Image (cartoon, rainbow, N blue to C red):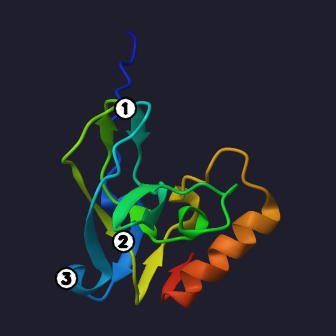
Amino acid sequence: MGVIKMQAPERASALVKYETSQQFCREEYPLAVPAEALGIQVGSIFAVVGGKAQPIDLTENGAAGKFAGFAIQERSVAAGSAGLRITLLSDGPAIVAQSAIKWPEGATEPQKTALKTAMRGRGIKLR
């Protein structure tokens, strides 16, 4: 007899182990209109540019390369989609599971270290 395996969407609890208050630690932003389709996963790292959330771009030195928060919902976004909003875990006190962080593709160890420092600076501890 075979076993059927199903992959359920990840929940915020896979990432967030503790937060003082959802009202204090989470922030909702309009999502920047993506040029290509996005597969947002729980734990994806975002930046905020011009008041709009977008996946972090570590090749940028400006706001696009600065940690603003983690996605806490899975979502598929079609290219050119406008008017969408996303909630980010953006501040602490909070504790997140380091194993649930979705690092940007190609992130180097020094870049990860810089992001971890930015997370701690916002009161988010990694465990």
The residue at which mark 3 appears reads as 23
Helix, strand or loop under label 2: strand
Q: In the image, what residue occupies the spot 19% across and 82% down?
A: 23
**Nearer to us in this view, 76 or 97:** 76
Residue 99: name its quadrant.
Answer: bottom right
The residue at which mark 2 appears reads as 89
Helix, strand or loop under label 3: helix
Quarter in which the C terminus is drawn? bottom right
Amino acid type of disc 1?
Answer: Gln
Q: CA distance from mark 3 to mark 2?
A: 10 Å
- State which tag comes first along the sequence, 3 or 2: 3
Q: Residue 38's spot in the image, x, y percent? A: 41, 36
Residue contact at pointers 3 and 2, CB within 8 angstroms: no
Q: Nearer the viewer, mark 3 or mark 1?
A: 3
Q: Residue 124's spot in the image, x, y percent? A: 49, 82
Residue contact at pointers 3 and 1, CB within 8 angstroms: no
Q: In the image, what residue occupies the spot 61% across and 50% down?
A: 104
The residue at which mark 1 appears reads as 7
Q: Residue 45's spot in the image, x, y percent? A: 50, 59
Quarter in which the N terminus is drawn? top left
Report crowding for label 2: few under 14, some 14 to 19, many 20 or more residues within 10 A (C-alpha): many
Helix, strand or loop under label 1: loop
- State which tag comes first along the sequence, 1 or 2: 1
**Nearer to us in this view, 78 or 62:** 62
Q: Residue 109's spot in the image, x, y percent? A: 80, 62
Q: CA distance from mark 1 to mark 2?
A: 24 Å
Q: In the image, what residue occupies the spot 40% across and 87% down?
A: 92
